[in-house]
Image: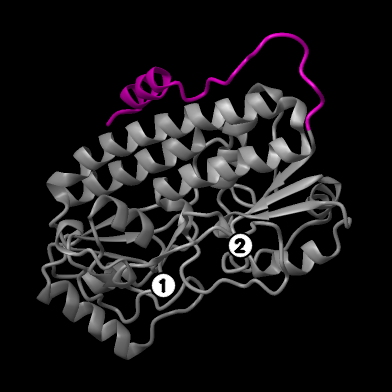
Amino acid sequence: MTNCRLARLISALGFGLSFAGTGALAEVPKVATDIPPVHSLVSQVMGEMGEPDLIVSPGTTPHGFAMRPSQARVLHSAEIVFHVGHGLTPWLEHALRSVAKDTVVITLSESPGTLKHRFRSGPSFDPHPRKDEDNHQSERGYVVTDQSTRHDKHNHENGDPHMWLDPENARRWLDTIAAELSEIDPENAARYRLNAQTRSADLAHLTTILASQLSPVSDQPFLVLHDAFHYFEHRFEIEATGTVSPGDTASPGPARITRIRNIVRERDIACVFTEPQLRSSLVPAVIEGSRARIGILDPLGASLRPGPDLYPQLLQKLADSLVDCLGH
């Protein structure tokens, strides 16, 4: 999908629009967010009433991030903080202990209805059955039941933290964001809720469009640099064959590199995807002599402008990258 078509789609769906309402707006709280996708979702709910602050800037990996003094001040001045959770930004745990006692900290990964996956192991993954072949949710992941999203220093979730890459999780988070903002800012509650409802419906429609776009390449085998895209893969039934690196900060050893080379040839891998934040010089070597191409998948929106449109653009860009590489 071209940029022009995406722009028309976003405009038609109402992305970039917000609930204007009538009369003067009540003063909104100061809001801080951890990563660009969360910043985008919060921006959607806040609409024209205000703009949240972003701690981890685009193009920066949140893993092992070190806050600058200016970013620490943003965190400390916020009345409410939205973040994915400890699994993504363990460094934020220490910083959150020092914020004002009345600062509200919301862990989105604990939102009711959030689907969680565990990290997959090994350079190659066991294929999951299709959704219509498998009704056992425990084989794929587990869903957060009704519990508090308010920060608990002892509540450290395990598993894959890249939950925002499932648009259904994002829709649950829109509800959580609206509810939490409404609680501390009841005068604007109706606006928050309407913005969340509108964006959730738009996102459901975009999900349907992306599923149709990805369906023709869903049977093409591919590798990812590290296991960051399980949520997107699961939602759109286009699952990776394996990973090059054992983790986002770990390099593969000689035995794993040999195994990856074999996988590329044995599975007739079509593409190996790197990431803007985690480029790897090993990828050209492991695909040498095969039909595999190199693509880029971006889980954070490194090249996108922060704001309400970033999240739908992020999903669209992931779909475009997969189709562009796997469709050849």
Q: Name the residue at 43% across, 36% down.
A: 312
Q: Earlier in the sequence, mark 1 or mark 2?
A: 2
State yes or no: residue 73 in magenta: no
Q: Nearer the viewer, residue 227 or 160?
A: 160
Q: Position of residue 299 (x, y in %)?
A: 45, 53
Q: Residue furthest front?
A: 146
Q: Are marks 1 and 2 in contact (CB under 8 Å)?
A: no
Q: Which structural element holds mark 1?
A: loop
**Which residue is drawn at the image coordinates 33% and 71% (left, top)?**
138
Residue at 49% x, 46% y is 172
Image position, residue 257 (x, y; %): 30, 82
Can residue 301 be seen here? The reply is: no
Q: Is residue 10 magenta?
A: yes
Q: Residues within 10 Å of mark 2 (few under 14, many from 20)?
A: many
* Left or right of 13 in this view: 26: right
Q: Quadrant of residue 308?
A: top right
| Residue at image mark 2 | 85
Q: What is the CA distance from the residue labelled 1 to the residue labelled 2?
A: 15 Å
User: Outermost residue, bottom direction?
Assistant: 255
Residue 243 sits in quarter? bottom left
Q: Quadrant of residue 209?
A: top left
Amino acid carrying label 2: it is: Gly
Q: In the image shown, does 111 or 28 lie closer to the viewer?
A: 111
Is residue 248 among the parts visible in the rendering? yes
Task: Report the magenta residues as a range.
Answer: 1-28
The residue depicted at 79 percent of the width and 38 percent of the height is: 30
Residue 80 relative to residue 138: left or right: right
Q: Which residue lies under the disc numbered 1?
A: 118
Query: Label 2's element?
Result: loop
Amino acid type, callout 1: Arg
Q: Position of residue 43 (x, y in %)?
A: 61, 34
